Image (cartoon, rainbow, N blue to C red):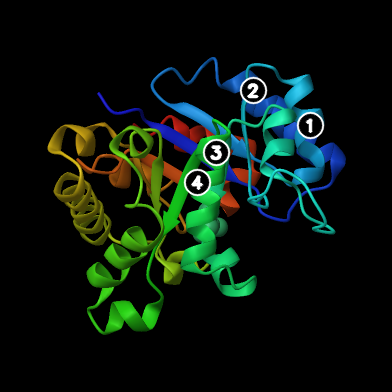
Amino acid sequence: MRKKIVAGNWKMNLLWDEALGLAQGVSEASTKVNNAELIVFPPFIFAPTIISKNPELNVGLQNFYPADKGAFTGEVSITQAKNIGAKYVLIGHSERRAIFNENEAFLKEKVNAALANDLTPVFCCGEPLEIREANEELNYVKQQLMDSLFHLSADDMAKCIVAYEPVWAIGTGKTASVEQAESMHKSIRSWIAEHYSKELSEEISILYGGSCNASNAKELFACENVDGGLIGGAALQLDAFISIAQSF
Ligand code: 13P
């Protein structure tokens, strides 16, 4: 059975009290959510306190630099991420690709660095609107996986989580339809089967992200190949996030 996962990417939102309050709320509520694993990705600066105050909560980092240490002013290393007790890292989010120019080779380095430090990569992929309009989304997403993820050995690939986040659905209120989501997730699983094995493809959780909320989560999560969600805006409200987590 694949793991069902609902993860909240808080992006660059919330202040100290709000972040700590939300983390505590998610941690307490996670005992009520027994059919899905919950993960939160708070801003860096709040992560160590959230981890030490909520030992049961799964916490990941939204970003890191793929080196152990050194002269990289302003960056946080993968070893520092591990050192504070983070368990997951987001890699390849479209905002990092577009705003911070993270390219395929750099994302590959990040995937390798995360795995070398026993952190679970949540590898994000997804096409922009013009690619979807040109009906090129399958080729585009497949290439993203080939460029930065499919170099892994089967053992390492088995440790990863994939998140499909169509760029046109992120923060727009325009969710992928059930058909669009299932078709892409099914394709992603088939490419994993092609590159590795059918068995491995059946084990990997593939999350959907992009305007997923308490109203549409149920139908999305009912898709055979959708194993949960990577939630942005709706993860900032405790009730909405927990309601999404209870949508399986
Ligand atoms: P929204 O849920 O706000 O569309 O964001 C999705 C996302 O980017 C999660 O990583």
Task: Calculate the distance from the C-alpha at mark 4 to the C-alpha at mark 1.
Answer: 23 Å
Residue 112 numbered mark, or none: 4
Q: Residue 165: x and y, percent?
A: 42, 59
Would you name the residue on which mark 3 appears? Answer: 241
User: Mark 2 or 1 closer to N-term?
Assistant: 2
Would you name the residue on which mark 1 appears? Answer: 48
Mark 2 residue crowding within 10 angstroms, few (<14) / some (14–19) / many (20+): many
Q: Residue 226: x and y, percent?
A: 29, 43
Q: Residue 169: x and y, percent?
A: 44, 66
38 or 204: nearer the viewer: 204
Residue 228 numbered mark, or none: none
Seen in the picture, residue 158 relative to 34 is either above or below; the reply is below
Name the residue rendered at 51%, 17% in the picture: 32
Q: Residue 42: x and y, percent?
A: 69, 42
Name the residue rendered at 56%, 44% in the picture: 113
Q: Which residue type carries mark 3?
A: Phe
For this view, does 152 lie left or right of residue 103?
left
Residue 144, located in which quarter of the rendered image? bottom left
